[in-house]
Structure formats: structure tokens, C-alpha cells
Amino acid sequence: MYIRLDRVHRAMPVILGGFTLVAIGVLFTWDAFPRYFPARAHDFLAAFPLAMIAFAYLVYQTAHRPPFRELLKAIMLAVAFVFWAANQLWPGLRQAILFNDTAIALFVLDVFLVMIGWPVTSPDESFAETYVAPSDPQVRKRGYPDETHQ
């Protein structure tokens, strides 16, 4: 069962996500002013937000206590971000291409699983999908009960 979090349980993932957004700002600052940063700083600046958002997403998911298959899918997505981060951090490493290809495969698999509806659970309304159970009254587009069918 999907659990909607209160402010206390939402705080840690939001704080981690905030640090990640700050890191994105620093990355774009490097893009605008690379001469003000140490050599090879871009590798770390690109890898850090990818690894951080993977960690933040796992914290977010575990706080929600999703069903096992959804947690497994969240872990797969986080691992994809970590492989992408590894590719950014160590681009000269012989395994960098494998890291990148693994990230691509996991991202593609994640999207494919979304497209086929796996795992079969109630869609998450936070992703702009509205779930209407077959026993629910007819609903208009915005999710409000249709007064004409009462």
C-alpha cells in the first residue's frame, strides 16, 4: 500500500533533493565559468547530483514503504543513476562504457516497465495519473465527481 508522507517523513528526501538541486546550480556555474574551477572538477560536479538523487529517491521510496516489486523497481532506477554517475566520475576508466551502457539499459527497462504497467499497482497520482477503481462513481477529467451521474 502506498503511504502518503507527513512533513516529518518527507523532510529527509526533500532536504537531499534540495542539496541535489544546489549541486545542479554549481554544475551550471561550471558550464558558464569553467576557468574558476579546478581541473577535472566537472567529472565530480556531474556525478554528484546523479548519485545524490539516486540516494534521495531510495530514501523517499523506503519512507513510503511501497510493495516489494515497486521497491525493486525503485532500486533498479537508483542503480541506473549510480552507473551514470560512475560514468561521469571516471570517464577514462576502461569500464566507463560498460557503466554508461548499463545505465542506458536500466533506464530503458524502467520506462518499458512503466509502459506495460509493471508492477500492477495503483498508479501514483503524484505522477499526474488519476486512478479510478472500477467501483468508483464516474469521474470527470479533473477528478471531481460528475454531478450528472449521481
Image (tube, grey):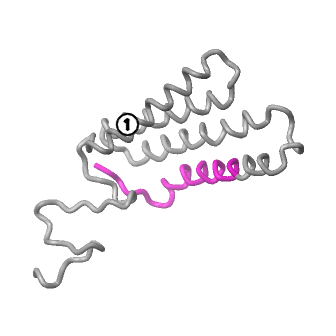
- Frontmost residue, 24 versus 52: 24
Tell me the amino acid under the disc marked 1: Lys
Inspect the magenta stretch and tell me whether residue 144 lies in it: no
Mark 1 Cα-neighbour bin, 10 Å: few <14, some 14–19, many ≥20: some
Inspect the magenta stretch and tell me whether residue 4 lies in it: yes
The quarter of the image holding the C terminus is bottom left
Q: Is 126 above or below relative to 43?
A: below
Q: Which residue is mark 1?
A: 73
The location of residue 43, given as percent across then percent down, is: 73, 33
The residue shown at (68%, 24%) is: 90
Which residue is the extreme one toward the right?
Answer: 36
Q: Is 149 above or below relative to 58?
A: below
Task: Name the image quarter holding residue 37.
Answer: top right
The location of residue 104, given as percent across then percent down, is: 48, 32
The location of residue 68, given as percent across then percent down, is: 31, 36
Q: Which residues are magenta?
A: 1-24
The residue shown at (32%, 39%) is: 113
- Frontmost residue, 112 versus 45: 112
- Frontmost residue, 94 versus 45: 94
The location of residue 25, given as percent across then percent down, is: 71, 53
Q: Is 65 above or below relative to 80?
A: below
- Frontmost residue, 94 versus 19: 94
| In the image: residue 87, left or right of residue 110 | right
| In the image: residue 134, left or right of residue 46 | left
Task: Name the image quarter holding residue 48.
Answer: top right
The residue shown at (10%, 80%) is: 149
The residue shown at (66%, 50%) is: 19
Element assignment for label 1: helix
Q: Is 9 above or below relative to 146?
A: above
